[in-house]
Amino acid sequence: MYRFVRSILFLLNPERAHYFSVTLIKVVQKIPFLNILINAKPDHPILRKRILGLDFSNPIGLAAGFDKDAQCFENMGKLGFGFVEIGTVTPQPQVGNPKPRLFRLKYDQAIVNRMGFNNDGVMNVASRLSIRNKSSNLIIGGNIGKNKWTPNEKANEDYLKVFNELYDHVDYFAVNVSSPNTENLRDLQDKGPLLNLLSALKKRNVELGSPKPILLKIAPDLSNEQLDDIIEISLTLPLDGIIATNTTISRNNLSASPEVIQRLGAGGLSGKPLNSRSTAVIRYLHDRLGDALPIIGVGGIHTIEDALEKLDAGASLIQLYTGFIYEGPSLIAAIKQALVKREQ
Ligand SMILES: Cc1cc2nc3c(=O)[nH]c(=O)nc-3n(C[C@H](O)[C@H](O)[C@H](O)COP(=O)(O)O)c2cc1C
């Protein structure tokens, strides 16, 4: 059925298709007959995982960027995700980069985006999350960032503001310093500023009473030396986990012509072409961290094999974005089925 829905969605421009899908997911869930069609089966108990001190009903999550404004997270849970990461959320609402800013590379099963943290701002997002169904077993992550106009020297204030406002409403935090679409944001991945930012968040986390897991989301374009710095910082603080990876600025592994690639312009590449690099980063981190810190593996998971490969490389949990756009909810079901088979 998703093939049919996708053929219609792919007739629309990618950003329209995205908003249409979010609306569709919200509406369909409210119609009793139709919601039966799309609601996933309850998770097999063998899929349960306790990671980060949290109980996940299954290890497959929706990556940040799909439900930036916490509009449809409950419904994404009903589609079968065990956790949903909302955001990236910034202190003030912002419109993001000029359109067009989202492109499909169909033959490469990829997406290029330069959305630029378009979001409703933390107060609106927090108010939507406040009516979250606490009895549901869906885990919610809050992915946090800074406004475009905030200089890096003042970035801590932005991250702390979003952290404070989301604190009562999310189960874990993902600190996003790895988006390529906010100028100079990735400089915050350097040792000095990173240590400074994460220490400030950790301090506030303790002050607020019942600390939430804080994970760092990193780019796939870091060198081994930069990854070593991140490992050192993660163990010193310590951090609670790492999310590897965000989109890449590389244009490797694409079959699209150089002219097409150039026409799309700047932005982060996600999907199939990112798969091998993100798995390599996960493997590098896991070889050095062992089980000291959990890793959430994300980047180019489009098949059961891609998912198993990420888990075998050392990821404790995985997330989907582009693979979900191309394959639909049946990808979640297929991965779960394979995991149940493997564990039994
Ligand atoms: C359109 C789009 C928007 C995204 N927005 C965010 C974001 O706001 N914050 C973030 O941390 N990652 C964002 N991402 C990155 C994804 O969360 C994920 O890390 C990346 O796409 C790799 O996974 P994938 O290949 O399964 O898509 C975005 C990705 C896409 C395609």
Image (cartoon, helix red, strand yellow):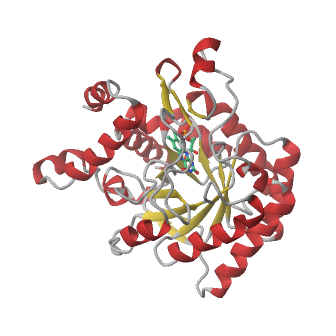
User: Quick check: 75 left or right of 248?
Assistant: left
Quadrant for the N terminus, please: top left
Question: Is 55 located above or below residue 330 in the figure?
Answer: below
> 317 or 176, which lies in front?
176
User: Quick check: 129 left or right of 2?
Assistant: right
Question: Is 130 located above or below residue 183 in the figure?
Answer: below
Question: Is 174 located above or below residue 315 in the figure?
Answer: below
Where residue 329 appears, as percent x and y from the top left, is: 35, 41
Where residue 249 appears, as percent x and y from the top left, is: 68, 34
Please name the residue shown 33% across and 28% down the image.
Answer: 12
Where residue 85 appears, as percent x and y from the top left, is: 49, 57
Where residue 141 appears, as percent x and y from the top left, is: 51, 63
Please name the residue shown 43% across and 38% down the image.
Answer: 324
Q: Quadrant of residue 192?
A: bottom right
User: Quick check: 32 left or right of 270?
Assistant: left
Please name the residue shown 69% across and 23% down the image.
Answer: 252
> 310 or 263, which lies in front?
263
Question: Is 341 located above or below residue 265 in the figure?
Answer: below
Q: Quadrant of ligand 1?
A: top right
Q: Residue furthest left?
A: 33
Q: How many marks?
A: 0
Q: Quadrant of residue 232?
A: bottom right
> 181 or 299, which lies in front?
181
